[in-house]
Image: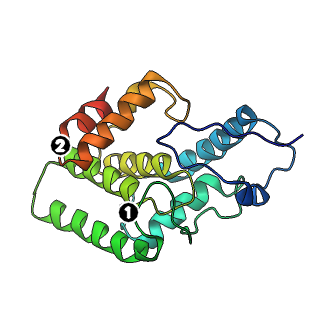
Amino acid sequence: MTMQFYYDDDSTPVNADEIHNLIPLHIQTQAELNMWEQNNISFAERKLFKGKKNIELSGDFIKKVHKIMFNNTWKWAGKFRTINTNIGIDWIKIPQELKVLCDDVEFQKKNNSFDLEEIAIRFSHRLVYIHPFVNGNGRCSRLITDLLMFKAGFPRFSWGSKNLTAISEVRSSYIQALQEADKHNIEPLINFARS
């Protein structure tokens, strides 16, 4: 039986060449993959949200979080993509753009350019826009955003209070908010993150 993946137009599909990078060989359906990935992410959350130690945002830290989130699922966990995809910047620019992003966050925090909530949401949007990984970019960006808030003593965002990987009305609202942020209107994404 060949595994079938289902994606909406706003997702990065895992192509047939990537299937060989799936670690659990018993998975046969999209539902099984989603559950396996979610269990991997739940483990990452338990590990990353321990203690109050501040994080130093960097490309290496972003890779580390992605690896912890998907290391039991995909061989490419924590590795930047080396191909262009339907979403994201040219793959060759990923390290440079992540450095700019992390430096911008530090500058914004130091200079109180925005409140921390807006800084975190702007970070999440730009990380999704850069799209450094083959897959899992949205989930990674939301987890790191929540981690930024948590480490500063604030609650995590609710992100629509639903599973954003499944094709749904809530996911559509999230995608629309990201598209508005692409047009420099961050308010819908801030409102969605709080919902």
Task: Say left or right for 160 vs 9.
Answer: left
Q: Residues within 10 Å of mark 2 (few under 14, many from 20)?
A: few
Q: Nearer the viewer, residue 127 or 168?
A: 168
Task: Say left or right for 72 vs 127.
Answer: right
Q: Toward which corner of the image does residue 178 lie, by quadrant?
A: top left
* Percent x, y of residue 174: 37, 34
Cβ–Cβ under 8 Å for marks 1 and 2: no
Q: Which mark is residue 170?
A: none
* Percent x, y of residue 81: 55, 67
* Percent x, y of residue 137: 48, 52
**Which residue is most to the top?**
169
State the residue at coordinates (42%, 51%).
Answer: 141
State the residue at coordinates (9%, 63%).
Answer: 111
Q: Residues within 10 Å of mark 1 (few under 14, many from 20)?
A: few
Q: Which mark is residue 185?
A: 2
Q: Secondary structure at mark 2?
A: loop
Q: Is residue 50 visible?
A: no
Which of the two discs, 1 and 2, sits closer to the camera? 2
Q: Against 15, is 92 above or below?
A: below
Task: Say left or right for 20 vs 81.
Answer: right
Q: Secondary structure at mark 1?
A: loop
Q: Quadrant of the N terminus?
A: top right
Q: Is residue 111 visible?
A: yes
Residue type, label 1: Ile
Q: Against 86, is 91 above or below?
A: below
Q: Earlier in the sequence, mark 1 or mark 2?
A: 1
Task: Say left or right for 116 vs 129.
Answer: left
Residue type, label 2: Asn
Q: CA distance from mark 1 to mark 2?
A: 27 Å
Q: Quadrant of the C terminus?
A: top left
Q: Which residue is mark 1?
A: 55
